[in-house]
Image (spheres, rainbow, N blue to C red):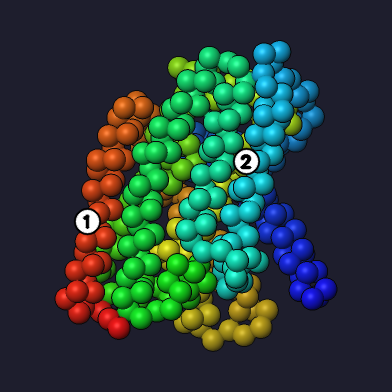
Amino acid sequence: MIAMLTAAVLGCIGITVYGLLFGLVLQGVDRKCAARMQARYGPPLHQPFIDIAKLLCKDNIIPKNAVKSVFNAAPIIALAASITILLYLPVGNLMPVLGGWGDVILVLYLLTVPGLAMVAGGLASGSPYATVGSQREMVTMIAYELPLAIAVIAMAWRLNAAGVADPFSLVTLAQTPVWSVVGIPGIIGMLLLMIAITWVTPAELSRVPCDTPEAETELCGGLLVEYSGRNLALFTLSGAVKTVAMATLAVVLFLPWNITWFVPLAGAAGIIADLVFFAVKVLLVVFFSVSLIRVGMARFRINHLVTFYWGYITLIGFAGMILLVLDAVLGMGVVA
């Protein structure tokens, strides 16, 4: 019992350090890639680490009319929730620390917590800019949650139709690629669901073109306008960790393969090879779903954002789900 508890504590500490460091690295890579696509040199890869160090050294200013308890608690809750998500996600061939105590539905709920914490912090700041930003964040969350839920439920249902036990488990999703149980209609459906998740990712991370809650040119930073110093650093770290979590979820759902599934590598060599391969997949997900989209798109207006996600992306998700259902009904692929 003590050994299990010690292993769990060490696992939590390791995942926390990994999430913070890898998240900041991903932010640096994203900024560098975006700059190069815009014919700029861009900041160094370690710039996010410098920014966090500067913020942690600055004073933590709290507005006079703010609700101080909520204003200070919001960034802590956002960061804690983002780290907690990582505890339920596999990393390479390493199984989740808390894999036996939650599934992908719990992860979907946890993904909303950092956004809700930002909304609470914005409303508690007492700023009219932050209030408008918080309202926009709530509308954005309502817009993108539906296609995300459609994609996850459709994939779990297809695994269940193939006779796979515990289809909502992240361990099951990581070890049993849905691609391996579907036929031609299912493959097309999976591609449509991948497109939907690719567009949900920038909205989940409040990145361009879905950064309307912050919108510096309109709202001067929106729901984070009154945050500074340590609190702003915590929100920044929360965003970095959530980037790792969202990219990891996309990898688990659509790119779960490991190098050791194809190349016989045992022991430490296999673990390292799988971790490197996993990092490459996460980088590719961030590049295509964050860097490429934000460079190629302008910011959505809030009404356009809702129309886009409830209209186009939800329809793409429904089309993918219907194709997965047809795939099972027609007996294509693996059916129990």
Q: Quick one: which residue is furthest to the left in this view? A: 330
Q: CA distance from mark 2 to mark 1?
A: 33 Å
The quarter of the rendered structure image containing the N terminus is: bottom right
Residue wearing tag 1: 319
- Residue at coordinates 45% horizontally, 33% vertically from top-left? 138
Q: At label 2, which amino acid type do we have?
A: Ala
Q: Which disc, if any, is residue 135?
A: none
Q: Is residue 120 above or below residue 170?
A: above
Q: Quadrant of the C terminus?
A: bottom left
Seen in the picture, residue 228 relative to 113 is either above or below; the reply is above
Residue 232: where, in percent of width, then height? 67, 30
Q: Is residue 221 visible?
A: no
Residue drawn at point x = 67 percent, y = 29 percent: 70
Name the amino acid type tagged 1.
Answer: Ala
Disc 2: CA contacts within 10 A as few (<14), some (14-19) or many (>=20): many
Q: Is 173 positioned to the left or the right of 43 in the image? A: left
Residue 177 placement (x, y as % from top left): 40, 73
Disc 2, SS:
helix
Q: Secondary structure at mark 1?
A: helix
Q: In the image, is residue 269 above or below residue 57? A: below
Q: Residue furthest right?
A: 2
Confirm or deny contact between disc 2 and disc 1 (CB under 8 A): no
Q: Quadrant of residue 37?
A: top left
According to the image, label 2 marks what residue? 78
Which residue is at the front of the view, 172 or 180?
A: 172
